[in-house]
Image: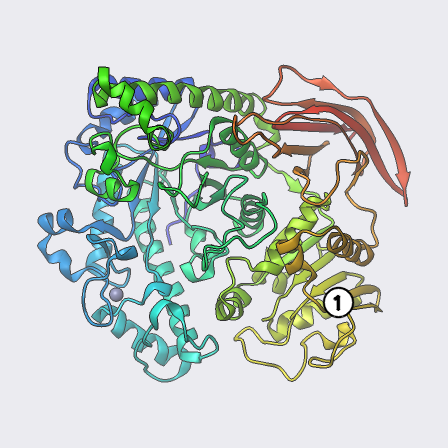
Amino acid sequence: MVKTEIPYWIRRGMIRFLWFPGGAGGYGVTASTPSSIEEAVKYATDCKANLIAVGPPFLRMWGETKGVIADRLKEFVSKCHKHGIRVMIRLCFATAYGPILLKEHPEALKWVQRTRKGSIYCMYHVPFRFNGCPCNPDWINYLKKIAKSAIDNGVDAIYWDNASWRVWEGACYCHHCKEKFREYSKKKIGREYEIPPYPERGVGVKWNDPIWQTYIKFHYDAMTKALKEVNDYTKSLEPGVATSWNLNPPGDALHGNRFTQLKAFDYFLLEAGYNFPGMEYISPITGEEESAKPRPVYNVVNYKYALSAGMDKAFINFIYHPEPKTEPPSITPPPNQVRLGIAEAAIYGGAISVPALPPKTTPVKEVSVWNGMIEEGGVGPDYYVFEFICKHPEELQRLLATHSLDDVYEALSREHGLRYAQAFSSYYKFLERHQEYYSGEVEPLVDATLLYSLPTQDWYRSDRREPLYGYAFLGFVQALLDSYVQFNIVDDESLSQDLSSCKTLILPDVACMSDQQVEAIKKFVENGGGVVATGCTSPYNENYRKRPDFGLAELFGMKYGHKPPNESRREVGRGRVIFLAGGLDKEYWKEAGEEGLEKLVDAVRWASREPPVVEPISPCVKPLQTVHLHVFKQRKRVLSHLINYNRNEETDEPMAVKDLAFRIRVSEEVKRVFAISPDFEGAEELTYETSKVKKKTYVQFVVPKLEIYSLVVIETKP
Ligand SMILES: [Zn+2]
């Protein structure tokens, strides 16, 4: 393995990111004419960005993009460097635009993924959207060649997109995969097996079948190996280049997105973000609304998960602002949502990106975003312009009477580009000035720790066709956020290794658990830890095989299958265990009732025993309230990040919240409390009082006004 240091400029809290071409503010910058390179660099400078992404058009591979950007990249990179801006290039790890790939490499027909019947697998049923197979050595060599040409052009960072080997759409049945799976199954379960058939849309899969499970694990392992091989090669050419790949939502196990795959990389991409109100309440399976209201959960879940499982690496999250019932299906968030998204990610040390764009050259009335990208390669103004055209066809007609289509596009995209530039620069200027609060060592201060269990997601939730993270987990997270209970998220690996830093462990419907984990949890409670378990926790082992009883039956004080009381509270050893038998957390996700919220939060408080990190004082706390608070500890200070999700959806204007009062636990004497924000100038000194609760010191303060985002810094004496 090639060992290299993570370049300092890509570490947590350092990135101020912009996506070119297009995305928010990329007003038609193509880098294909001299003036547009200048314009691109000026735009990035105006936005105060320090890292920008470029890439060959959607689906196309590096080396197949002559005349678009490939032959101007060196010049582009050098002009960016003159302004202190680094350049990241997006490359595809699997997807390839079939016709171009085959024209340049006729032999590539042998490199791509095959269906069971032997035909070429086209992703999302999009014709020509071929996928290289990660088990095919020729494809891997091709990827290495692409990486080399990017490095030769002087890029600072590489981002691999579309590591698409999608087990839920049908496995790859090429001869490399078949042969490798035979070897793998022999090694893992003692016999050579063929790749199991994949039923239509995953219905009828036996999720506890050892052969199917072995195939899924093969999938993870083969992808990990392929990513590592290409990455090691890249690093051997240029150790200083920063590398990453798109994990999609990292909790989505069947994407094959494991944090273990991240070990070799310097930073990572998430394609997990939906701005509030977003799509998170829409079922990915039925397309129906599933919860009471749109909830600002997904980004926070992913960031918290990334913080613990992501080994402190920085991330860039793709933010969509979807209107699922309309075409195009996803659009660039409006400028104030971009501001909110930047703040949300910065709190957790990361950055955001916004989606790519439809082409300028495609006739407007025929544009469908995805087809447009495929046909024309996606160079043009951003979604926002496109959205304007979709929403105001008459206005467009009127403009077209006196102007050419190109001029209209140009004018609209410039206008919107400017609005985005203001959004970016106001927040990026703030982050640059106050970098010390976002980079370096920052630790979340938590009351509780949630377990995110991959075996439960892989087998148990897949079997029930629950969405990513599952209803119980999402409901519990929402309840904690709505009540200002501070928490972090850990994965199975950290649970098996070390529970010493955890005070209260929440197990929301964690069905699958290894014997080792069961023992670790028992020991944790004996030693004084608190446990809150809900629903169907621990009746299965990590391979989704049923136990005769709950693994944690001793702690719950009840047997599996007996009609349980709704709740059991017990003191075990020096610790406390509370088991909520029903689906309170699932119900909270769907209904958001006040009573359910109280019960969930009360359970955490009871199990914790410790006084909480945050006590909200002002009456702003009610279910579905939309101010969130995230508390972190840094040397000599406590950082309280406040985000306000209340907004006027018509105008995109934030609805400010006034007089927010909190009491926050601190371990040292308080020296000064002040608020800073990209929404106002300077620092605002806050008056504060300190008090003692159960031997803990609390500081109480009032934030007079919260627009979108404020940071309250509590400086303590050493
Ligand atoms: Zn294959």
Vertical relation: 100 (above or below) 470: above
Tell me the quadrant of the picture where the C terminus can be found.
Answer: top right
Q: Write the residue at 84% across / 54% down.
A: 609
Up the image or down, 355 lies above or below 510; here it is: above
- Which residue occupies 48% across, 77% down? 208
Q: Amino acid at mark 1?
A: Phe
Q: In the image, 61: left or right of 541?
A: left
Say whether residue 33 is visible.
yes
Please give the count of numbered marks on the rendered protein: 1
Residue 73 coordinates in the image, percent (x, y) = 23, 30
Q: Position of residue 499 (x, y in %)?
A: 68, 59
Query: Can you tell me which quadrant of the image ligand 1 is in?
Result: bottom left
Can you tell which quarter of the image residue 83 is in? top left
In this image, 688 relative to 176: left or right? right
User: How does the figure colour the protein chain or chains?
Assistant: rainbow
Judge by depth and name the residue closer to the eye, 187 or 645.
645
Compare residues 126 and 439 and report the one nearer the observer: 126
Q: Which residue is mark 1?
A: 579
Rendered location of residue 301, percent (x, y):
57, 48
Q: Tag 1's secondary structure?
A: strand
Where is residue 667 drawn, in percent x and y? 80, 38
Q: Is residue 44 above or below residue 171?
A: above
Q: Nearer the viewer, residue 110 or 528?
A: 110
Image point 83% across, 68% down: which residue? 570
